[in-house]
Image (cartoon, helix red, strand yellow):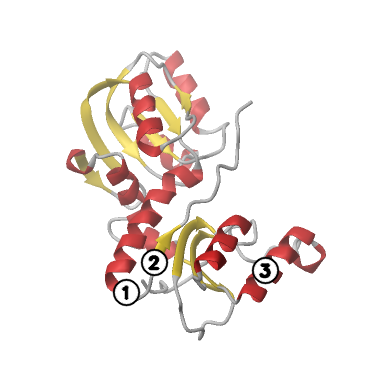
Amino acid sequence: MGTPSGATVDGFVAGAPDTIVTGVVITFLASQAVLERAAVLGSNLVITHEGIDYSHHSNASWLRDEDPVWSAKQAFIADAGIVVYRYHDGIHRRRPDEITAGLVEALGWESSVEDIRPEASIVRLPPIKLRTLAGILKEKLGLPYVRVAGDLAASCERIGVTVGYRGGGAVAIPLLREVDVVIAGEGPEWETPEYVRDAMHRGRKKAFLLIGHAASEEPGMRRLTARLQADCPDVPVRFVSGPQTLQLL
């Protein structure tokens, strides 16, 4: 797996690195519930894509010891003897990006990929209505909802598939010059969605689908689980998904 060179958020973020591993849990985010599940499974190494400090960088000085939620989480990790390793940059820097590749595979689009880039995979499908495409995403990924900017009745063929926070304008808007639709996890609501609104106002059929940060990146971590289990057959390696965080009322 390995830690990438240069600036990175990857590495051990809790526990003793020299601990003998009894089992591995891989997850998108090591929430309290995921950590408790790891303890029940007897897995003392948790590999998480996102950090455990509610911040991309583990320098959240506004948390620390005075925060009861953060403190309780740290105490549980210590009491359970769990080691937490963050694997974010390394898996994104693989070629292809293994997180994006996992999402493409989960959607069954491997044979439809036209181009693989560091920030996205470009997929060409037979013409499909945007509403139908949204339904496929919900079905394939088991999602209760997706968010859409665009004309639901519009037909689309060329799709930019990206993950996580790459729904921001810096990534998604250049992609939309080349594709009909961009799929992403999340991004600022006033960037790409507003670009799509202006494009539609000018008669350009563009669309944007937000499926959620976790939903877009969990398939890649599942892919990592299978790879790591094949590399370490004598150690149980399991993927644990956290509960749905946000609800629509």
Image location of residue 158, percent across then percent down:
26, 30
Q: How far, Cα to Cα, is label 2 from label 1?
A: 8 Å
For the point 43% across and 29% down, the residue is 208
Which residue is nearer to you in this view: 43 or 197? 43
Which residue is nearer to you in this view: 23 or 176? 23
Q: What amino acid does circle 3 point to?
A: Phe
Q: What amino acid does circle 2 point to?
A: Val
Q: How far, Cα to Cα, is label 1 from label 3?
A: 27 Å
User: Would you say residue 165 is visible in this rendering?
Assistant: no
Q: What residue is shown with label 2? A: 237
Q: What residue is shown with label 1? A: 232
Which quadrant is the C terminus positioned in? top right
| Mark 1: few/some/many CA within 10 Å (<14, 14-19, 20+) | few
Q: What amino acid does circle 1 point to?
A: Cys
Q: Can you tell which quarter of the image residue 188 is in?
A: top right
Image location of residue 184, percent across then percent down:
43, 39
Is disc 3 placed on a helix, strand or loop? helix
Q: Seen in the image, is 69 located left or right of residue 151? A: right
Is disc 1 placed on a helix, strand or loop? loop
Q: What residue is shown with label 3? A: 76
Question: Are the residues at dot 2 and dot 1 in contact (C-beta closer than 8 Å)?
Answer: yes
